[in-house]
């Protein structure tokens, strides 16, 4: 699924294994699906170019992806939204709850040799990118680990490599990438953050759904970011109610 750029090398995506974890029960719908493919996460090779990361195709398999996609709200604005600020259906909400739970935390901690026991979690949903999105950046230092679950179907845009996240070797050249990740088919990307975890994508304007889970630090900057998202969720709920 990767593409070889002028100085890029194709990134490999691990295959699927079997599901695990007992699904939590949603209070207003059917049991939330827990079909996340932990065995594939455990078996996937740990890539180191351009920085340590894991890339797993179909971490959310096709049947579950279809149900989750049907439960996603239309989002006509850019930015990341706390799930509580949106009308998210039970299947999508259930997957987000499972992602924020202990099973994925333990698996990621083991694969990267991290202690995430006390790391606060922050889950957001993004549904659209615009002309200013995708610029090369590193994530906030308040985020110890970034986890992205892509919820889109394959389209011509992704085949043209628009909106496909690139893991970059530096801050200056979007073509100098080691792996390219089409945001499709329940693909999971995980990487610990650092001063050289540069990433970005070519411009794409339109729907581009992704769940982002972050394991945060416990310092003041992380508390401030978590507080900002809680306030944002409250404001957006008031706006929606109005």
Image (cartoon, rainbow, N blue to C red):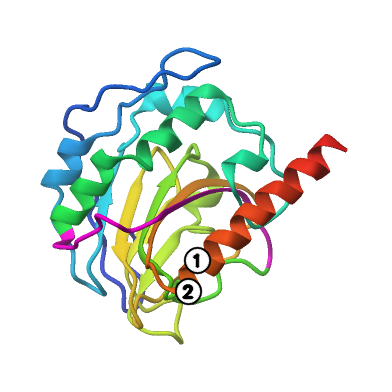
In the picture, the disc for residue 220 is 2
SS of the residue at dot 1?
A: helix
User: What x and y, as percent, mark residue 80?
Assistant: 60, 54
Cα–Cα gap, marks 2 and 1 = 5 Å
Residue 76 in sight from this viewpoint: no
Packing grade of label 1 (10 A; few <14, some 14-19, many >=20) is: some
* Range of residues picked out in magenta: 112-131
Look at the image and say whether residue 117 sits in the magenta stretch.
yes
Specify whether 241 is left or right of 212. right
Question: Would you call the spot at circle 2 few (<14 residues within 10 Å), some (14-19), or many (20 or more)?
Answer: few
Q: Which residue is mark 1?
A: 223
Residues 206 and 227: in front is 227
x, y percentage for residue 33?
A: 38, 23
| Identity of the residue drawn at 52% across and 23% down | 90
Q: Residue at x 65, y 33 (%)?
A: 73
Quarter of the image for residue 85 reads top right
Horizontal side of residue 88 vs 30, given as left or right: right
For residue 54, side relative to residue 62 (left or right): left
The quarter of the picture where the C terminus appears is top right
Residue drawn at 40 percent across, 38 percent down: 185
Task: Identify the mark at residue 4; answer none if there is no mark.
Answer: none
Whether residue 111 is situated above or below residue 59 in the rendered picture = below
Q: Residue furthest top?
A: 30
Q: Is residue 22 above or below residue 79?
A: above
Q: Whole-percent x and y of residue 51?
A: 25, 73
Indicate whether residue 8 is drawn in magenta.
no
> Residue at horizontal 31%, vertical 56%?
190
Considering only vertical position in the picture, is 146 above or below 61? Answer: below
Picture quadrant where residue 239 is located = top right
């Amino acid at each position: 699924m990767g593409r070889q750029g002028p100085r890029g090398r194709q990134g490999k995506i691990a295959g699927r294994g079997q599901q695990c974890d007992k699904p939590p029960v949603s209070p207003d719908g059917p049991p939330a699906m827990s079909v996340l493919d932990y065995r594939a996460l455990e078996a996937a090779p740990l890539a180191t170019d351009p920085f340590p990361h894991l890339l797993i195709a179909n971490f959310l398999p096709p049947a579950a992806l279809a149900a989750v996609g049907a439960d996603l709200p239309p989002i006509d604005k850019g930015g990341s939204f706390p799930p509580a600020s949106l009308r998210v259906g039970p299947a999508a909400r259930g997957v987000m709850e499972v992602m924020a739970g202990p099973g994925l935390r333990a698996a990621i901690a083991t694969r990267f040799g991290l202690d995430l026991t006390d790391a606060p979690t922050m889950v957001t949903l993004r549904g659209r990118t615009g002309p200013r999105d995708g610029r090369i950046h590193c994530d906030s230092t308040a985020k110890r680990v970034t986890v992205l679950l892509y919820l889109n179907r394959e389209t011509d845009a992704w085949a043209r490599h628009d909106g496909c996240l690139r893991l970059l070797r530096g801050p200056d050249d979007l073509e100098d990438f080691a792996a390219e990740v089409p945001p499709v088919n329940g693909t999971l990307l995980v990487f610990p953050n650092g001063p050289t975890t540069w990433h970005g994508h070519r411009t794409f304007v339109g729907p581009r759904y992704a769940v982002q889970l972050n394991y945060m630090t416990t310092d003041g900057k992380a508390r401030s970011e978590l507080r900002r998202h809680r306030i944002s969720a409250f404001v957006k709920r008031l706006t929606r109610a109005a």
